[in-house]
Image (tube, grey):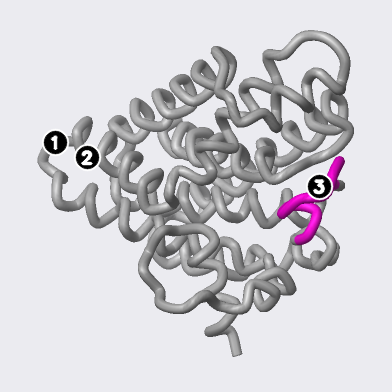
Amino acid sequence: MLLDPLRALLQFCTVLPLGRAADFDAFARRTWLYPLAGWVTGGVAAAVAMLLSGHPALAAAAAIAAAIIVSGANHFDGLLDLGDGLMAHGSREKRITALTDRQIGAGGVACGILTTLLAVVGLADVWSVALAVLTAEVCAKLAMAWITALGVPFHEGIHAYLHGFSRPHFVALALIPVLPLFLLIPHLLILRAVCATAIVVLVLLLTSYRLFGGVNGDVAGAANEITRALVIIALVL
């Protein structure tokens, strides 16, 4: 049954009150289900956008805020940590220290502001704020599924744990929860969004291997935030 892994997934990716803690291993063995969480977070963001449909800029800002809040800003925290790691100077060890340090520096603040700014401004200019943010959230979780399956960890942690259960074919399976998008928006736009997702994953993997020697949970979380912004931009252009 998919109920237990789905509940564990939503408890991991959202702050929604879902009762007692689910068996996390049930999700760890099926990380290709990540995009289903995007339907939930994106659905919440889309609902907020529809309530403010008469004011595109306000709807865009509120939708992005809703997506971050319903996720507990967990992935956003990863984006800030990655920003610090990218801006750190010196050896790989110093970069890893900046990446994993609980303190947030200027690099993290800049990365968080710029990424969120791009997402909000792009979303305000799109053809449908609600459908665009829903698509972006589903693709953001697709990026996390791909990072989890492909990203070799550089130390022990939640990413290493999930990666240990992942299999290469999870990359293909993760596309299954994305398919319902074909019923909502033009097919060309979905393909454009998936291509943008793949670009983010590829760039993050290459950058993380070069700078940190691998991937951790912060990189996976950052993939969510960066993919959301880039998918929105891809839908606008």
Q: Label for residue 59? A: 2
Q: Residue furthest left?
A: 54
Q: Label for residue 146? A: none
Q: Quick check: can you spot residue 196?
A: no
Tag 2's secondary structure? helix
Q: Label for residue 55? A: 1
Image vertical order of residue 131 relative to residue 75, above or below: below
Q: Earlier in the sequence, mark 2 or mark 3?
A: 2
In the displayed structure image, the side of residue 233 where residue 184 appears, left or right: left
Residue wearing tag 3: 151
Tag 3's secondary structure? loop
Q: Is residue 186 magenta?
A: no
In the displayed structure image, the side of residue 200 where residue 207 appears, left or right: right
- Chain part drawn in magenta: 153-161
Image point (30%, 44%), residue name: 63
Residue 32 image-quadrant placement: bottom right
- The answer to which of 76 and 178 lies nearer the viewer is 76
